[in-house]
Image (tube, rainbow, N blue to C red):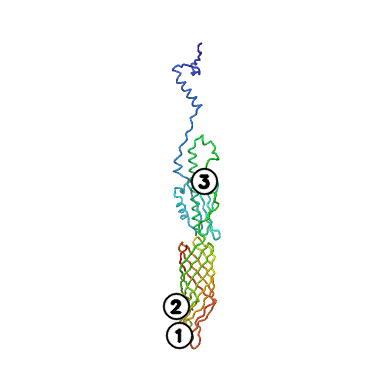
Amino acid sequence: MTRASRHASPGEQSCPANAVSFSRSLLPHCHAFFALVIALHFPKPALAQEPSLEIEALPERFRLVYAAPADCPNWEAFSRLVRERIPSDWEASPAELARTIDVDVSRRGDRYLAVIAFSTTSGELVTRAVTGVLCADVVNGIALVTALAIRARGAETFEQGATGAASGPESSSVPRSAADAPPAAAKRAASLEQTTQTNTPTSPLHLRVGLLAAVVTGVGPDAAFGAGLFAALEWPSFRLGLGVQRFDSGPVRASDVPAAFSLLSARVEGCPAFQLGSRSALEPCAFAEIGSFHAEAQLEPPRVSVSKPAAIAWVAPGLLGRWILRLDPILVELEVLGRFPLYQEKFYVQSEQRQVIFRVPVFSAGAALGLGLRF
């Protein structure tokens, strides 16, 4: 049996499927035909692209917007606290397009509230708050939250960008399984979002001790100067204090008689506290003093030929106002006071007739300046 073969017309050349032998002129066309068939039925698989180095070289930038009262740390201090915690290149230049993180510090009664607002990669707005008595502590706390937000957001953006660059056109169309573990940055962001409020790590109790110099009335006919020691336990809104003071009038003339007066007293006080700023406070206090009041006439013959010192008990309740300036650990105090001695005793000399030279007044005023340490 002979094989039938079909010959191409002058304008057509082909390679029949049952052809056993071919002429040399048809071989190049057959090769092209089979190459085309293979290319159409077996497409070349897509190659995964390498992650772009530009993702790491150009991380996401952020711009901080900060607002705070005048008695709180300023913009430079806040931004420095953030840079200390995340020193990498995250700050945007003034002309650069960047995401904004808003930080607002305000006062709420005797406390400060700092709120940070930022958006996640999905566009969700997230806010966090820090509250405390001292504005410096509140700003320090919100700076930590800001650094965590920048670090989590920047790492999340980088990991998502690297994942997208490494995914080819085939794999990018496949939906991600719900069982897949989230990236580490997403875990950190989720952990941050679970926190509804961060409290500043401030100690509820402080101790302050120091020295003071004071001037008062009521210790002799003129103002008397003195010095003392003070100590106080300090809670956020209350103070309990102790003090010891001594005042001396020095040589004075009382009703034209040379004399000297002195007062040694101890004081206990209780004070509510009102914050005037991150470093200052006002303390209106009620106190009670107990001690010994001493008087002695100086010899001046023939008018005063015998001097017999006299001492009486001193008991005086009173009120004071104190302004505090904290430059931790240094403490500066300025106070004014008024007290009411309960015993208005008279002091006299015996000459031809008894002569009263001084009487403890009903009211005594004073002022003091103190310097101490706060722990």
Q: Earlier in the sequence, mark 3 or mark 2?
A: 3
Q: To which residue does mark 1 refer?
A: 306
Q: Is residue 70 above or below residue 14?
A: below
Measured as percent of width and height from the top left, residue 361 is found at 53, 78
* Labelled disc at residue 37: none
- What amino acid is found at the position of numbered circle 1 in the picture? Val
Q: Nearer the viewer, residue 229 or 98?
A: 229
User: Number of marks in the image?
Assistant: 3
> Residue furthest toward the top?
1
Query: Can you tell which quarter of the image residue 251 is in?
Result: bottom left
Q: Are marks 1 and 3 in contact (CB under 8 Å)?
A: no
Q: To which residue does mark 3 refer?
A: 187
Q: Secondary structure at mark 2?
A: loop
Instruction: Give the CA separation, mark 1 to mark 3.
Output: 90 Å
Q: Secondary structure at mark 3?
A: helix
Q: Nearer the viewer, mark 3 or mark 2?
A: 3
Q: Earlier in the sequence, mark 1 or mark 3?
A: 3
Q: To which residue does mark 2 refer?
A: 250
Measured as percent of width and height from the top left, residue 124 is found at 55, 46
